[in-house]
Amino acid sequence: MNKPKDPPARPPARFPASLHQAKPAAAKARPELLRPQRLLHEAARDARLLSMPSGLGLDNPAVRERMVQRLRGEGVRCEPVLQAMLRVPRHRFVDSALAAQAYEDTSLPIGLGQTISKPSVVARMLEWLFLGESARGHGHLGRVLEIGTGCGYQTALLAEVAQQVVSIERLRGLHDVAVRQLAGLQTPRCELLYGDGMLGHPLRAPYNSIVAAAGGEDLPQAWLQQLAVGGRLIAPARAADGRGQVLVVVDRTLEGFRRTLGEAVQFVPLKSGIS
């Protein structure tokens, strides 16, 4: 594969949409290479032994409908994303003690110092993926690489709007939780990996869509190399002035890479290795 060209020297354009801030915490890193996923039939077996958060009317589709209507009111217009958020039960991805807050527009702790992002943040990022050339042409996100599985909620949404999802998590505890949750919901077309997300996953490359839930100084070259022509990458990265993060949108064309900047965001720091 040819080495990706550097983005143009001119200042990047400003991406028109905006995001509310989400504030996860960082996690300790330990360098190690990607490890293979757990067998899904084992995960499904274990998931059947667990009791999912339920009750309080949270399994009623009307609860998710209210969340989606709020997102519409905030300007989210991508129908495939909204329909996915109608189908995926967010309350099943958080602790039962927090389930009553699952459909509020707030981030919630999921353990190991991490959080599940606000619904509005997730919806906007997935909507922006749909604005990429490949997604516009095909009506779906194609093969997706997700950096940072977390509890698996965004992974489940991606599975609703993509042909295949490869998701990498560097924290073993979260990886195991996501495997159980997604197996319990019988989420299709997902390959969950425990490993170093900064390396991507070249075995399944190229990807039509890449989305990251952690931000570093800049985007790793491995991600750019694994992005297909016509594909789109969305990830937070450090702002040019060094203060905080901005959302970066990269489109790969036959001529190279086109980089666009969004508004200020705050995600966990991108780290190498596993823990």
Image (cartoon, helix red, strand yellow):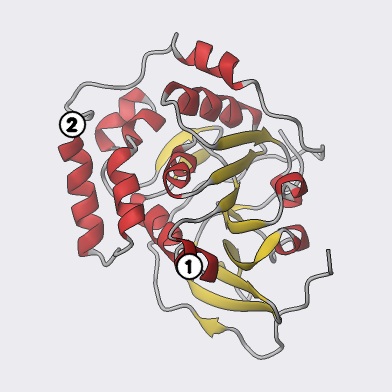
Secondary structure of the residue carrying tag 2 is loop
Q: Nearer the viewer, mark 1 or mark 2?
A: 1
Identify which amino acid the numbered label 1 is placed on. Answer: Gly
Q: Is residue 243 visible?
A: no
Asked if 242 appears above or below 33 in the picture, the reply is below
Q: Residue at x 51, y 17 (%)?
A: 44
Asked if 254 appears above or below 171 in the picture, the reply is below
Residue 34 drawn at (x, y percent)? 77, 37
Picture quadrant where residue 90 is located? top left
Residue 141 drawn at (x, y percent)? 50, 56
Residue that protrudes farthest toward the bottom in the picture: 10
**Left or right position of 188 against 102:** right
Q: Is residue 4 visible?
A: yes
**Left or right position of 66 against 250:** left
Q: Residue at x 44, y 26 (%)?
A: 186
Q: Quadrant of the N terminus?
A: bottom right
Picture quadrant where residue 125 is located? bottom left
Residue picked out by circle 2: 60
Residue 72 drawn at (x, y percent)? 23, 61
**Left or right position of 220 against 116:** right
Few, some or many residues within 10 Å of mark 1 (<14, 14–19, 20+): few
Few, some or many residues within 10 Å of mark 2 (<14, 14–19, 20+): few
Identify which amino acid the numbered label 2 is placed on. Answer: Asn
Residue 55 drawn at (x, y percent)? 21, 21
Q: Are marks 1 and 2 in contact (CB under 8 Å)?
A: no
Residue picked out by circle 1: 137
**Left or right position of 124 against 30:** left
Secondary structure of the residue carrying tag 1 is helix
Considering depth in this image, is 83 or 234 the residue closer to the camera?
83
Mark 1 or 2 closer to N-term?
2
